[in-house]
Image (cartoon, rainbow, N blue to C red):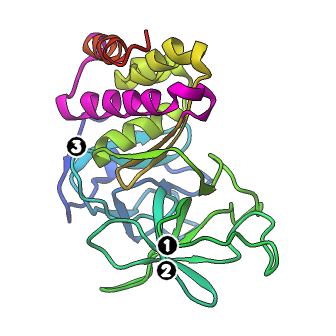
């Protein structure tokens, strides 16, 4: 296996760091852009990839994927297939115009881009409403529009991760690096994510808050995390705030597994939840 490689924006990915050529297409994760690819008849890997952000190159030979694990920062660059939490700014005849980040142009979300949506059953979203969406396309060139969707284009279903409007709950800001870690953790088993990423804060919160009804979260690659604890009854607000504090504290202080557990215990005690 190749040694770890850190890339900066514009750096080209060396071919010896890419997975071996397979019959199935190479899949790109966040932080990378494809400039050219080998012909279908070629038996050698000659993909030309460049980095769009700084990060550590990560490859998965079994899934034939390559991506960049970004460092903790607040800047988000839309990438196709990213899951994001967007806020509706206004609507037009065919689209909801949504904010993905405060400093970029609005993304376009089709009013029928929801599971089972028709002109009569489409969600009636208003300014300020939140949606959990996937980046469908980013266009080409400066000022290109970003298009979002709340369904899987292949199935027409709100999958994976329960895409669609987010009702209730609260949203907390985290770094894009922390968002990537949380998404990786959600795509593997709890034990695997603990070992691979050193991220135990969610599993600790889950165990300690189970008697109060647990919680739901949605993580956006754009540095947003939505938390809903409506099952906690009168303690819902305190539980929600406690979870947000634990996630932000872990992120801002880059806590290891031991300190994450201590933080969870300390925050829940301060909120009189444990």
Q: Position of residue 232 (x, y in %)?
A: 58, 26
Distance from label 1 to label 3 (Cα)?
30 Å
The quadrant of the rendering that contains the N terminus is top left
Judged by depth in the image, the label closer to the viewer, 2 or 3, is 2
Identify residue for label 3.
Answer: 72
Please give the residue where the numbered disc 2 appears in the rendered image.
90
- Cβ atoms under marks 2 and 1 closer than 8 Å: yes
What's the magenta region? 229-258
Asked if the residue at tag 3 contacts the one at tag 2, i.e. Cβ–Cβ closer than 8 Å, the answer is: no
Residue at which label 1 appears: 127
Rounded to the nearest whole Å, what is the CA distance between mark 2 and mark 3?
31 Å
Residue drawn at (48%, 47%) of the image: 65
Where residue 207 sits: x, y (%)?
52, 13
Q: Is residue 53 left or right of residue 49?
A: left
Residue 253 located left or right of residue 147? left
Q: Examine the structure image and report whether residue 13 is included in the region drawn in magenta.
A: no
Secondary element type, mark 3: loop
Badge 1 or badge 3: first in the primary sequence: 3
Q: Is residue 240 magenta?
A: yes
């Amino acid at each position: 296996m190749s040694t770890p490689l850190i890339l900066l924006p514009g750096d080209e990915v060396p071919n010896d760091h890419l997975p071996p050529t397979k019959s199935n297409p190479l899949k790109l994760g966040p932080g990378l852009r494809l400039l050219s690819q080998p012909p279908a008849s070629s038996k050698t890997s000659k993909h030309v990839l460049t980095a769009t952000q700084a990060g550590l190159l990560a490859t998965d030979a079994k899934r034939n994927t390559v991506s960049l694990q970004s460092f903790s920062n607040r800047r988000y660059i839309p990438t196709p297939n990213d899951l994001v939490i967007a806020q509706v700014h206004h609507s037009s005849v065919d689209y909801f115009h949504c904010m993905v980040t405060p400093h970029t142009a609005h993304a376009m979300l089709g009013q029928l881009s929801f599971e089972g949506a028709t002109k009569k059953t489409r969600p009636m979203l208003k300014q300020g409403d939140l949606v959990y969406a996937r980046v469908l396309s980013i266009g080409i060139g400066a000022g290109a529009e970003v298009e979002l969707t709340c369904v899987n284009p292949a199935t027409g279903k709100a999958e994976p991760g329960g895409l669609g409007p987010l009702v209730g709950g609260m949203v907390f800001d985290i770094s894009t690096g922390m968002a990537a870690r949380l998404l990786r953790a959600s795509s593997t088993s709890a034990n695997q994510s603990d070992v691979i990423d050193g991220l135990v804060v969610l599993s600790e919160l889950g165990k300690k808050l189970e008697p109060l009804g647990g919680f739901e979260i949605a993580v956006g690659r754009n540095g947003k995390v939505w938390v809903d604890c409506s099952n906690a009854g009168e303690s819902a607000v305190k539980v929600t705030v406690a979870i947000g504090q634990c996630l932000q504290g872990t992120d801002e202080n880059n806590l290891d597994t031991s300190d994450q557990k201590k933080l969870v215990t300390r925050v829940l005690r301060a909120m009189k939840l444990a």
